[in-house]
Amino acid sequence: MKKNYFYLLVMALFVLSACAQKRPVSMPQSHLPPESVPEIGGSVPDQSTVPGDSNVGGKGADQSPLLSAVRPVQRPRPKVLVRMIRNAEKQLKNRQPQLAFSTLEQALYIDGQDPLVWHLMARAQFDQGNVVQAVSLAKKSNSLAAAYPDVREKNAALLRKAQGS
Amino acid sequence: MKLLRRLVIFFLLCSCLACLGYAYLINHQVAQRFKDRLWDIPAKVYARPMTLYPGLQLSAKSFGQELDLLGYRRVSTQAQLTVPGTYTRYQGRFVLNCRPFNFGTQARPMRRIDLTISRGRISRLKSLGRDADMEQLDPVLIGQFYPSSMEDRVLVTAEDIPALLKTTIVAVEDKSFYSHYGIDFKSIFRAIVVNIREGRFTQGASTLTQQLAKNFFLSSEKTLKRKLSEAFVAAAIERQFTKEEILAAYINEVYLGQDGARAIHGFGLGAQFYFGKSLELLSPGETALLVGMLKGPSVYNPRLQPDRATARRNTVLGLMADQGLISSPQLTTSLGSPLGVIPVPRQWRFPFYLDLVKRRLLKEYREKDLKTMGLRIFTPLDPLVQLAAEKGVADFMAGRNSKLQAGVVVTACATNEIQALVGGKQPKYEGFNRALDAKRPIGSLVKPAVYLSALEQPEKYTLVTRINDGPVSLKSGGRLWKPMNYDKKFHGELPLYQALVHSYNTSTVRLGMDLGLETVFATMGQLGFEPAAALVPAMLLGSFEMTPIQVAQVYHTLASGGFYTPARVIAAVYTPDGETLQHYPLRIEQHLDPGAVFLVDKTLQAVVREGTGRSLSRWLSRDLGIAGKTGTTNDLRDTWFAGFSGNRLAVVWVGRDDNTSTGLTGASGAMQVFGRMMAQVPNTPLVLTPPENIEWAVINPQTGLRTNSHAPGALAVPFIRGSAPVVSDPVPEVSPPTSVTPGSDKQPVQKKKPRYLIDWFKDVFK
């Protein structure tokens, strides 16, 4: 008899569950696309470099390619690009902004979407007194820098300087 | 008698005075002539130099093609890599003896490059025996602007001329060069004697200086007057210049053969044309052959008359040995060696691209200067992309209507440099350049501008705003205009992005009219093109004309996130001495909100993934995420496709010059060329980076309202921040949105634990 009560209770709970109110479930809102949901246009795996490629340097090298399929992540930076960026930074330090700009134009052939390259181009223009170009280039850098808070900060500082000049 | 003597003296005095006067005049003319530039040097136009680095996406086939374009010769073993411009290949490994090249800003020496290509990428790169991060090849010469004489030459300075060449020329052509004053009377006397004895003209007596004088100032007619003038000019040259200067001028001036209409002048070009090397690398045998050819470049043409040329070379070699210019072992080796002449270097011709280069240059230079100053013009043309574009057009045209024509423009997404241009289906024909001049209605290619105008008003329009694709009729120009969809159906209410994905006409016209024509075409202006015609509603469906290159400019602004960059076809112009005349740096201007452009670009990706461009997957992997738009005009007259990957943008037009129907649509016409072309060149995936003002929400596309991730058909949709719908879908499993702090977006979304027993039950029995 006790056993029957138990089954009855389970059945009652089961029936009642169907009548339950919908519980509020928080839905994250973000400027990043949600994972596991199809996007408009579909997501694209980043194939700019071979996974595990030893020629890739920089912070993004250990990022999972799967993650980059749905979220903006730092792009893998080939060693040659790392070297070109270093050269350009050196040239900027040595007050050779024109030369640095040429170096960075070359760097765009390797990766045209690296926000640091665009930021340094903005600096090169700023150092030459071309404030309007510097602002445009810094904004371009910002538009590519969703996964680069450090570059965004640098751009913000440059834009502040440009406004003050 | 006295009178006669006086008359004779007077006559002699007059003659002397006349001679002196003439000599003075000639002297002045020579001084003037040599003060100016001595030769007209054609401008040389170069492609981009190929940059090599480990990790670069490059197939062994493409690299082989690049070396072929550069005229590098393949040899069997590394031991044969003795001259620049040669390479060996063992499957994916290439070892090349790279040519030296002066880029203007920097000079690259001759060096050995060793690279390995595996799985479509450079896996190892060595330069001069050490691992290298980057290397740059010399650029492909893609064309020249010739002077009217069609003379071509590579100038060499006196210091760069090998001593053996100088001494050989003197030994063969003018033994007393260093002792006479322009005219060698002993040789003239000897020649007269020989010619009288032989009874015909067999020996000349012109000195090097006289030959130079004849080439610079006089015609080639054989008259006494011309001979006398030649003597005067030669004497004037000798008076004003050193022997070394005269010899250098001679070496640069002489005619050494013909390459079609192009005349090969000077030993600098001669060495390249016949042996594929620079002057300083010529062997004694090669030097002997070139010097021997002076007697008759056609008669002793080593490619057409190898036996005669060999005999002539051997004669000169014998003379060189007699004069002690080469040793006996050198003579023996040289006599036994083959001529070593290379096949005629292939002259690459890209007339449509060159046409564009010339048009741009003529805005800043006079045509005469372009053809004579020896300018070195560096362009961003990528010959591999250019050949792929030409092949894409040719493959598509094969077996189709012979009246179909095409125009193609390919640019780099980052810099908007024009990498390739095809102005017609016959790429080597210098004719009507359709890529630049074919003004045709653009059809649906205008639609992104309409939707961008809407999405720039996030308070009114988002990608999921419901718009009406019902019948529409408008009064335009006194007539009733009733646009129809291509499928002759109406699709009722639908999300805004779907209307663009499927290129629906009636919804676009409704949307455009709601926005206002001025607003839409102001956006078009920001993208890079403002139609000159008065605005009418039909223009919302692209009933205004643009050229392919103008369309490329507009779509580049979309591809670069709303930043306008003027298209560039020239990187820099240098003088022959390496001085920079003009440099054209990258310039950008922000014209549009990157957030709104991001939304349009996402939708253009959907066009290719699921809309009118979906058959592109036949040619290109869906993983590339190509964004693009098809365009077709009334009666299928014009077919367009504009699209971009992560690194390259291309616009293709296919139509007929007589403006009649092609029987093709954007997808079955221009897009097929796009696919064929882009499949042959390296493309990086288009990974669109959401700008800062973009937020995402999960949306039910049927209702345009929020839903949760598990709802059927749920779609992640980007919105301009603050414009995402706040109302949730009233279907089961939906919950109202709650915002999260900005930092939370970095946390992985975890599945929520059930908080109630009933939820647990629901999960169990789900």
Image (cartoon, coloured by chain):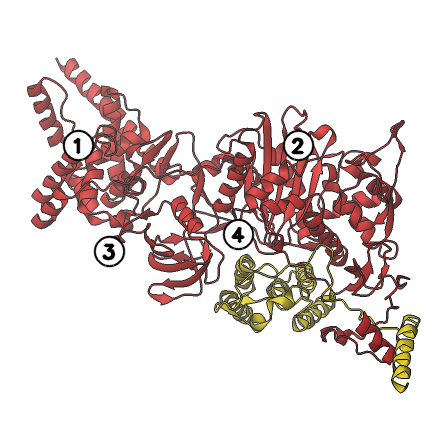
Chain colours: A yellow, B red
SS for callout 3: helix
Q: Tell me the kind of residue under disc 4.
A: Pro
Percent across and percent down for residue B628 are 67, 47
SS for callout 1: helix
Q: What is the chain identity of the residue bearing mark 2?
A: B
Cα–Cα span, label 4 and label 3: 33 Å
Identify residue for label 3.
Answer: B79
Marks 4, 1: nearer the viewer: 4
Marks 2, 3: nearer the viewer: 2
Identify residue for label 1.
Answer: B307
Label 2 vs 4, first from the N-terminus:
2
Q: Which mark is residue B664?
A: 2
Marks 3, 1: nearer the viewer: 3
Cα–Cα span, label 2 and label 4: 28 Å
Label 4 vs 3, first from the N-terminus:
3
Identify residue for label 4.
Answer: B682
**Residue situated in front as seen by the camera: B442 or B563:** B442
